Amino acid sequence: MAIPVIDFSKLNGEERAKTLALIHNGCEEWGFFQLVNHGISEELLERVKKVSSDFYKLEREENFKTSTPVKLLNELLEKKSCDKVDTVDWEDVFLLSDNNEWPSETPGFRETMAEYRAQLKKLALKVMEVMDENLGLPKGYIKKAFNGGEEDTAFFGTKVSHYPPCPRPEMVNGLRAHTDAGGVILLFQDDQVKGLQILKDGEWIDVQPIKNSIVINTGDQIEVLSNGRYKSVWHRVLALPDGNRRSVASFYNPSYKATIAPAQQLVEKSNKQVNQDYPKFVFGDYMSVYTEQKFLPKEPRFQAVKAKWKKTTV
C-alpha cells in the first residue's frame, strides 16, 4: 500500500475533475498525498537539498553529538539497559520564519530558503483553494479563516530537520507519533533515506520517497474546519542505522488570534447521526494545549479547548 501520488499540473487541463477527485480522496481517506509537477522548479529544489545538507554539516552536526538524545542513549547503553529513550526525538531541528534569526554561515542558505519559502507559500494557498472547491466552500474560505479575516496574519513556518544515523535505532524514535496541530503541511522529504510513516487502518505505512515531490498532509485545524471530512493523521519518523535523513517541512497555520470552527455549510450538510461535534476555539488556546499533549490522542485536546471556549463566552 502506498499513499496517493498526484500530478498537480493536470488541474489546469482536461483532467481537472479527475485531479480534484484524487486530491479529495487523498485528504478524506489518507490525510497524506504526494504532489508531482507542482510548479516548483527542480533547480530550486536541488539547491534546497544542497544548502540544507551543508547547513547541517557546517552548523549543526557537531552539536548533535552532545545533544540530549545522544546523551540519553549513551547512558542506557552504558547501563546495558533494555529501556527505550521515549521522551525526546533523534532529530536535529531548526525553525525558519519571518520573525527569527536565520543561519548565516552556510553559503547560499538564506537566499535559497527565502526563495523556496515564497514558492511553498504560493503552493499552500493553491492547495487550500482546491480544498475549498472540493468541500463546496467559497474560494478563499480556508485562507480567510486562518487569517482571522485579516490579510496575511496566518503563520507560515519552515522546519529544517535532519535525522542522523543512529547506532541503536530500536531504542529511540526519530520523531514520535503525532498529528500536526496546524493547517496544511508541505514536506520536501529525503528522496534517498526513508523513515516517514503514517498510520492507515491500524497499520504503519511508509511514505515512499519520490524525487522532488512535495508531500501534503492535513493538520488538526483542517479536520475541525472540514467538520471531520478531512482527518489529521498520525505519523512518525523512524530512527535508522545509516543515512542522514533530510526533511524540510513547511506549514501554513492559523494566526494565534484566529477563531477556528467547523464551516457552517458543512455542519448543515452533515448527517447528524455521525456529527463529530467539533469545537469552536481560538487557535492560540489550542496551541497551549497541543504543546503539552502533542504525542497524546487529539480528541482530548479538542475537548479541552471546547471547555475553555465555553468559559470565555459565558
Image (cartoon, helix red, strand yellow):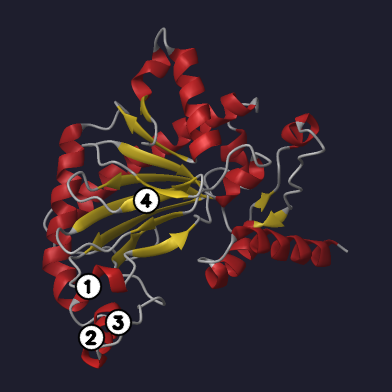
Name which of mark 3 and mark 4 comes first in the sequence. Answer: 3
Per the model, the C-alpha gap separating discs 4 and 1 is 19 Å
Per the model, the C-alpha gap separating discs 3 and 4 is 24 Å
Give x and y (percent) for residue 151. Answer: 56, 42
User: Which residue position is annotated with label 4?
Assistant: 197
Q: Is residue 73 left or right of residue 311?
A: left
Q: Secondary structure at mark 3?
A: helix
User: Which residue position is annotated with label 3?
Assistant: 68
What residue type is disc 4 on? Answer: Gln
Give x and y (percent) for residue 85. Answer: 35, 78
What residue type is disc 1 on? Answer: Arg
User: Which residue position is annotated with label 1?
Assistant: 168
Is residue 146 visible to us here? Answer: no
Give x and y (percent) for residue 266. Answer: 72, 33
User: Which residue position is annotated with label 2?
Assistant: 77
Give x and y (percent) for residue 44. Answer: 19, 38
What residue type is disc 2 on? Answer: Leu
Per the model, the C-alpha gap separating discs 4 and 2 is 27 Å
Q: Is residue 11 left or right of residue 153?
A: left
Nearest the viewer among 242 and 228 is: 242
Per the model, the C-alpha gap separating discs 3 and 2 is 14 Å
Q: Are marks 2 and 1 in contact (CB under 8 Å)?
A: yes
- Quadrant assignment for the N terminus: top left
Number of the front mark, 3 or 4: 4
* The residue positioned farthest toward the top in the image shown: 14
Q: Is residue 294 left or right of residue 45?
A: right
Query: Dot 3 surroundings within 10 Å: few (below 14), some, or many (20 or more)?
Result: few
Query: Dot 1 surroundings within 10 Å: few (below 14), some, or many (20 or more)?
Result: some
